[in-house]
Image (cartoon, rainbow, N blue to C red):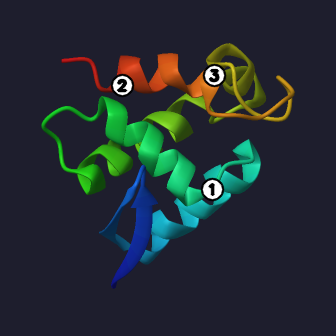
Amino acid sequence: MHICKNVNVGTRRTSIRLEEEMWTAVDELCTREGMTIHELCSLIDKFRGANSLTAALRVFLVMYYRLAATEAGHISAGHGISVGGHGADRWRPLIAQVFQN
């Protein structure tokens, strides 16, 4: 089943329609990284190129969980509790790498 949620991306409001499991993954990621869904989507939006925000969010989720499948993955990716600290600044390189044109 798909669920539609409204998010604020920068100064605009938009909606994203994802499977329930994907929303659970988004919620877990945001909790772990100390971000809101709005911060995550705004950051992804800056690097998504021609991809839809929904597609870009799905790709980011897959890449995040692939890189973070283990604590060693978290450390090498530069995120997670093991690394310490939270914030969007350290996400820019990863998002830029995921959505390179």
Q: Residue at 40% across / 74% down in the picture?
A: 6
What label sits on residue 90 in the rendered view?
3
Q: Residues within 10 Å of mark 2 (few under 14, many from 20)?
A: some
Read off the residue under disc 2: 98
In this view, the mark in front (2 or 1):
1
Percent x, y for residue 54? 28, 56
Indicate left or right for 5 with 71 as reference. Answer: left
In primary-sequence order, the first of circles 2 and 1 is 1
Q: Residue at 19% across / 32% down in the picture?
A: 49
Disc 1 marks a residue whose amino acid type is Thr
Indicate left or right for 8 with 24 as reference. Answer: left
Above or below: residue 32 compared with residue 76: below
Percent x, y for residue 2? 32, 81
Q: Secondary structure at mark 2?
A: helix
Q: Residue at 55% across / 58% down in the picture?
A: 37
Task: Indicate the quadrant containing the C terminus: top left, top right, bottom left or bottom right.
Answer: top left
Percent x, y for residue 43? 46, 38
Read off the residue under disc 1: 36
